[in-house]
Image (cartoon, helix red, strand yellow):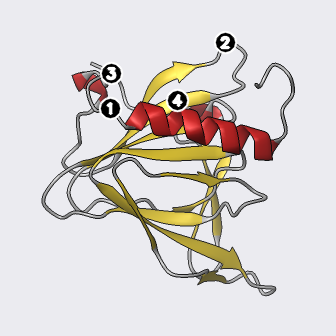
C-alpha cells in the first residue's frame, strides 16, 4: 500500500481495517512493551519500516495519565488493545489560542481512529481509567519518535519536541 504511493484516505481506510484486526486479539504484545511507568505514559517502538515510511508503537497509560496537548504532523492510526482512552481535539483560532473542538471521544478496546494534519491533528489524550492501565497500538506515517512535533498551551504557546521511545528492557 505505501510502496504504491497510496493517498492518505486509502491508507487510513485500509490501514484502519488491518489495525482493527490486530487489536481484536490481546495475546501478542510482548510484556516488555506493555509496562507502565508510575509517573508518565510510555511509548514503545514495536516496528520501524527500514525507510521510516511508518512506525508501530504501543502506547501504555498508567492509571490517570495523560499527554500534553500535541500534534503529530503525519497521518496516524490509533487502535485500543486494552482499556480505554479519551481524546479531546483542539483547533487553533485566528488569534492563535487553542479551543476544544467537539466533545471528547472515548476509544474503547477494539476501536480504531485516525489523526493527521488534514483530519485534525491537535489533541490531548487521557487514560479513561484511574485504577488500571490502558494500551493503544499506534501506527504513524513516519518514525514518530524522530519526528519534529509540537506541544501547545491553551493560550497558543508552542514548544517543539521529539517523543523518542521508552527502552524495551
- Image coordinates of residue 27 in percent, x first then y, are 26, 25
Between 1 and 126, the one lying in front of the other is 1
Kindly indicate the quadrant of the structure image that contains residue 123.
bottom right
Q: Residues within 10 Å of mark 1 (few under 14, many from 20)?
A: few
Q: Residues within 10 Å of mark 4 (few under 14, many from 20)?
A: many
- The quarter in which the C terminus is drawn is top left
Badge 2 is on which residue?
Answer: 50
Between 90 and 8, the one lying in front of the other is 8
The answer for how far apart the CA atoms under marks 4 and 1 are is 16 Å
Q: Earlier in the sequence, mark 3 or mark 2?
A: 2
Badge 3 is on which residue?
Answer: 168
Taking 78 as reference, is 141 left or right?
Answer: right
Badge 4 is on which residue?
Answer: 56
Residue at image location 50% in from the left, 81% down from the top = 103
Q: Earlier in the sequence, mark 3 or mark 4?
A: 4
Q: Earlier in the sequence, mark 4 or mark 1?
A: 1
Residue at image location 21% in from the left, 49% down from the top = 133
Amino acid at each position: 500500500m505505501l510502496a504504491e504511493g497510496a493517498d492518505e484516505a486509502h491508507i487510513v481506510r485500509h490501514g484502519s481495517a488491518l489495525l482493527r484486526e490486530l487489536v481484536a486479539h490481546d495475546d501478542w504484545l510482548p510484556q516488555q512493551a506493555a509496562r507502565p511507568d508510575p509517573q508518565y505514559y510510555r511509548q514503545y517502538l514495536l516496528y520501524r519500516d527500514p525507510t521510516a515510511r511508518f512506525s508501530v508503537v504501543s502506547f501504555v497509560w498508567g492509571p490517570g495519565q495523560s499527554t500534553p496537548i500535541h500534534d503529530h504532523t503525519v497521518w496516524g492510526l490509533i487502535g485500543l488493545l486494552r482499556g480505554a482512552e479519551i481524546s479531546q481535539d483542539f483547533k487553533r483560532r485566528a488569534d492563535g489560542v487553542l479551543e476544544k473542538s467537539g466533545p471528547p471521544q472515548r476509544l474503547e478496546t477494539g476501536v480504531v481512529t485516525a489523526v493527521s494534519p488534514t483530519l485534525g491533528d491537535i489533541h490531548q489524550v487521557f487514560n479513561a481509567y484511574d485504577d488500571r492501565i490502558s494500551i493503544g497500538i499506534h501506527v504513524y506515517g513516519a518514525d514518530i519518535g524522530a519526528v519534529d512535533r509540537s506541544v501547545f498551551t491553551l493560550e497558543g504557546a508552542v514548544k517543539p519536541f521529539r517523543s523518542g521511545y521508552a527502552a524495551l528492557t
